[in-house]
Image (cartoon, grey):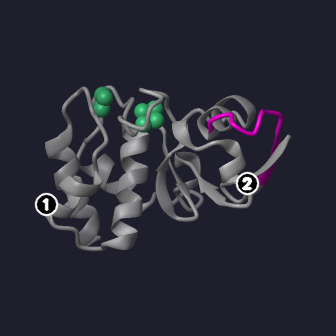
Amino acid sequence: MAQLNINGRSHQVDVEPDTPLLWAIREQVGLTGTKYGCGVAQCGACSVHMDGAAVRSCVIPVSAAEGKKITTIEGLASGNVLHKVQKAWVDHEVPQCGYCQTGMIMAVAALLKDKPQPTDADIDATITNICRCGTFQQVREAIHAAAKA
Ligand code: FES
Ligand code: FES
């Protein structure tokens, strides 16, 4: 058993301590916006925030997430008000199939918190999420739009 704080709520999860946080989020808590892609911290589909930093939840054991503040895509908006990154994503019609996009948005939200006006070099260095649909150009445009919002 472990206690996780996800999107401001406390959840008891019945998993081994070394279970990846991703599976606790999806299968125990039932928040399925966070996706599984590679399982080895390469694709970014599973990105969530842990104490405000973007992490790849497929390689974070539940034991390392206890006592931390976890935010998933379901907790990014404030009530009915979209986060500025979500709004920019809608305005710029970024998603194609959508599979990678929740992780992409979480990574970008963390980037803009650390660097409110990122350069293209900052984006290239930080947003290493993989999108098989090739939305990278729209992602870049939407990041710059969100930075101006
Ligand atoms: S599923 Fe975690 S980085 Fe790919
Ligand atoms: S939108 Fe399809 S994988 Fe990124």
Label 2: few (<14), some or many (≥20) within 10 Å? Answer: some
Question: Considering the image in quadrants, where does the N terminus appear?
Answer: top right
- Quarter of the figure with residue 94: top left
Instruction: Give the numbered dot on residue 120.
Output: 1
Residue 138 image offset from top left, x and y in percent: 18, 45
Classed neighbour count for the residue bearing mark 1: other residues with Cα under 10 Å, few (<14), some (14–19), many (≥20): few
| 90 shown above or below 123 | above
Q: Quadrant of residue 19?
A: top right
The quadrant of the rendered image in which ligand 2 is seen is top left
Residue linked to disc 2: 66
**Type of amino acid under label 2:** Glu
In the image shown, does 85 or 104 lie closer to the viewer?
104
Is the stretch drawn in magenta largely helix, strand or loop? loop
Amino acid tagged 1? Asp
Q: Is residue 45 visible?
A: no
Could you say which is closer to the camera, residue 34 or residue 1?
A: 1
Is residue 31 in view from this perspective? yes
Q: Position of residue 34 (x, y in %)?
A: 52, 37
Q: Which corner quadrant holds the C terminus?
A: bottom left
Residues in magenta, as a range? 10-20
Q: Indicate whether residue 146 is drawn in magenta.
A: no
SS category of the residue bearing label 2: loop
Assign a secondary structure to mark 1. Answer: helix
Of pointers 1 and 2, the one earlier in the residue sequence: 2
